[in-house]
Image: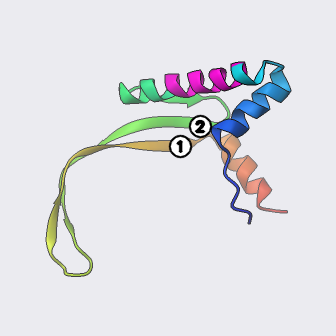
Amino acid sequence: MGEKTLTRMDLSEAVFNEVGLSRNDSAQLVESVLTHMSDALVQGESVKISSFGTFSVREKAARVGRNPKTGEEVPIHPRRVLTFRPSHLMKDRVATGNKS
């Protein structure tokens, strides 16, 4: 399987090709969308994109972990983590791509 990564530049190029905005306007549009998404997540809101999935922030409680090398107990502090839950359509689309 190829290890290609979709970047902001790839997204803005796709907007440029499909919508017809200038390259500069396409890059600004992509940047604006990503900024709105990240701002909402920072405020604790979920970001749901229909037919794609839902990004949300989850609070993880403090707990005691263990260093696997030494066996020493280490406290893990409470934190917020970003989660992504793909939609059923996205799951099906990815699974179908695996059946080539």
Viewport quadrant of the C terminus = bottom right
Query: Badges 2 and 1: C-beta atoms under 8 Å apart?
Result: yes
User: 84 or 35: which is nearer to us?
Assistant: 35
Residue highlighted by disc 1? 85
**Looking at the picture, does residue 28 appear above or below residue 10?**
above
Q: Residue at x 71, y 22 (%)?
A: 24
Residue highlighted by disc 2? 53
Q: Secondary structure at mark 2?
A: strand
**Main SS type for the magenta part?**
helix
- Is residue 25 toward the left or the right of residue 73 in the image? right
**Magenta residues, as a range?**
25-36
Task: Tell me if mark 1 has few (under 14), some (14-19) or many (20+) residues whose alpha carbon lies within 10 angstroms of its own.
Answer: few
Q: Position of residue 46 (x, y in %)?
A: 45, 29
**Looking at the picture, does residue 36 appear above or below residue 8?**
above
Q: Position of residue 83 (x, y in %)?
A: 45, 43
User: 75 or 91: which is nearer to us?
Assistant: 75
**Looking at the picture, does residue 43 appear above or below residue 97?**
above
